[in-house]
Amino acid sequence: MFFHKISSLLTNFTDHHSHILPGVDDGVKKMEVSLKVLEQYAQLGIAEVWCTPHIMEDIPNTTANLQARFAELCEAYQGPIKLHLAAEYMMDALFEERLEQGDLLTLGEEHNQLLVETSYFTPPMDMDAILSRIKQKGYYPMLAHPERYVYMGKERYTALKNKDIRFQLNLSSVAGAYGSEARDKARWLLKQNYYNIAGSDLHSIRNIEYWSTRAPRALKQLLQTDTKHLDATTLRVSEIAQPVRKKSVFLQSDF
Ligand SMILES: [Fe+2]
């Protein structure tokens, strides 16, 4: 089985971003498929999974309906992976309402982070104000897959990090799953040590092979250039990275 060869790369990995809670967004649709995903995750050695379904004006999941569905998943799943529920919030008017009401599903054991995203093409008009309001409410904004936003460049990334905005890497970006621009941005962000956590952003069981094989291989190759870019507890860098330093080859494109 192909998982056996690479499973050590993801041993004890925590997937901080996934759409495997069934039937609530554009991710996995059926409970039986979610259970198969978790079975394959367990074979990979993955220890914890955060279910982070979309909440946005177009997919207006309520906190209550997600909690109920999550309880069903926990009831049905009998395996070793520790499951958690958070959400991936589009920073739109619905999110502003939920933030104001404190009606939120938080990410992280300390329940103090909010996984937020924007359109891939344009930021919300008042993005910085929204991020400030999140912090005023006592949460750390965790920007989902910053490498995928075509409107963001190096200066903007650095400005956001200077405002203590946290970044979540989609592992598949490093291998080029979203194109060369997102790949190069992910590699640059890794080099800057800008990422705080990583995830699969898995929407379908068909995505497992890609993100669990090509992404770790790309990371392994990348991290041979520098072994200190990611926290060992989120990416197991100590297992992925090799103590060999090669000349950096991944920063040739300037986006
Ligand atoms: Fe997502």
Image (tube, grey):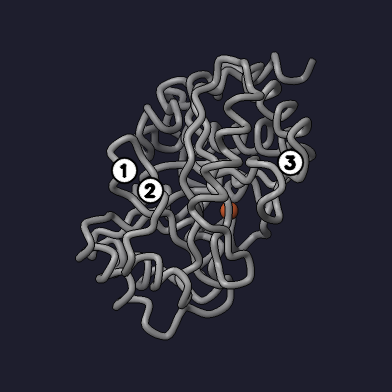
Q: Is residue 105 above or below residue 110?
A: below
**Which quarter of the image is occupied by the N terminus?**
top right
The residue identified by callout 3 is 207
Where does residue 30 sit, x and y in percent of width and height? Answer: 77, 39
**Residue type, mark 2 in image:** Thr
* For marks 1 and 3 on the same chain, the one whose residue lies earlier in the sequence: 1
Q: Is residue 246 left or right of residue 8?
A: left
- Answer whether labels 2 and 3 touch (C-beta < 8 Å): no
User: In percent of the image, x 78 and y 30: which residue is there?
Assistant: 32
Q: Name which residue type carries label 1.
A: His
Q: CA distance from mark 1 to mark 3?
A: 28 Å
Q: Are marks 2 and 1 in contact (CB under 8 Å)?
A: yes
Callout 3 environment at 10 Å: few (<14), some (14 to 19), or many (20+)? some
Task: Tell me: residue 187, above or below residue 102.
Answer: above
The response on whether ligand 1 sits within 8 Å of label 2 is no
> Residue tagged by mark 2?
106
Q: Which residue is mark 1?
A: 111
Residue 171 in view in this figure: no
For label 1, the crowd category at 10 Å Cα-Cα, with few meaning under 14, some 14 to 19 and many 20 or more, is few
**Tag 3: amino acid:** Asn
Note whether ligand 1 is within 8 Å of mark 1. no
Q: 129 above or below 37?
A: below
Q: Mark 2: few, some, or many residues within 10 Å (few <14, many ≥20)?
A: many
Mark 1–mark 3 CB contact (< 8 Å): no
Q: Position of residue 14 (x, y in %)?
A: 48, 30
Q: Classify mark 3: helix, strand or loop.
A: helix
